[in-house]
Amino acid sequence: MKKVLTIAATTLALGLTPLVGVQASPADDLSAFQGYFKKRFPDTKLADYKNGVYSVDAPSREQWEEMEEFPPYELAIDDGESIWNKKFANGKGYADCLGEVGAIRAKFPHYDAKNDDIATLEGAINKCRTDNGEKAFKWKKGKLAKLSAYIAYQGRGGKGDVKVEGEKAEAWYNAGKTFFYGKRGQLNMACADCHVYYSGQRIRGDTLSPALGHTTHFPVYRSKWGNLGTLHRRYGGCNKQMRAKPFKAQSKQYKALEYFEAYMSNGLEFNGPGARK
């Protein structure tokens, strides 16, 4: 499978057009991707991948379960609820843009055909603010991450069901796929190197998490950060670790990557916010 995926990604990265019938469809990719992890970690149930690295590393899971008794993101959820309940200067609130809070998380990410863009949860929050005359929150942490955490918490138990329908949506999906399997940085590594081929193995003091389920538990509180951060903040950190220049949060590159990764995790429950090292 590694050879097939690498060839497909290389073809896309070079800008070549695969022969009709050769390039896998998103549905084919999904089946192969989830099938790969089922074989790689046969003792891990598919549904448990929502727990990230804790689904494949028993010692880490024990520590995490103890931490979850008094989760470090608990106060952030409370702050997020306060932000949600605070009305804008015009008297409207987030519910007027985003709908019922418990149903929001499952809507994102999705392809926005009107703007030929990928709509993310954080993007929708800031759009709601600016559409109502408020300043946008900073993208990576702070109030945006806290509000996202509250929304994620209210949406726990919902399942990912990302759609890739139409040529333009598939172009975004393929851009994310290319990014995921593409080599970058001075270390010349791809997202897939760490989180597919070497998932479950140790690097220094950490265990590499499986890519399956990556998007289900964000935003996350990382001990390294000492606070909550968004998915795109984590993407930037990963790029830096590969000694590659990171893209900006909510860039086209990171939105495409989120779209691809979220699609690969279809069927898994949301359980954000999460806690990681």
Image (cartoon, grey):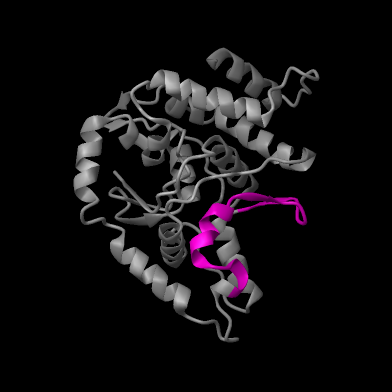
Residue nearest the observer in this picture, 123 or 151 = 151
Residue at x 63%, y 24% (from the top left corner):
9
274 above or below 83?
above
Looking at the rendering, the stretch of residues picked out in magenta corresponds to 96-119
Residue occupying image coordinates x 64% and y 25%: 28
Q: Quadrant of residue 203?
A: top left
The quarter in which the C terminus is drawn is top left
Depicted 49 relative to depicted 8: above or below = below
Image coords of residue 202 (percent x, y): 30, 25
Residue 80 locus on image (x, y percent): 41, 68
Q: Is residue 136 left or right of residue 205?
A: right
In magenta stretch: residue 117: yes
The residue sitting at 58% across, 54% down in the picture is 107
Residue drawn at x 34%, y 25% is 200
170 inside magenta stretch: no
Which quadrant holds the N terminus?
top right
Q: Residue furthest top?
A: 3
Q: Residue 206 placed where, x, y %?
A: 29, 32
Camera sees residue 17? yes
175 or 243, which is in the foreground?
Answer: 175
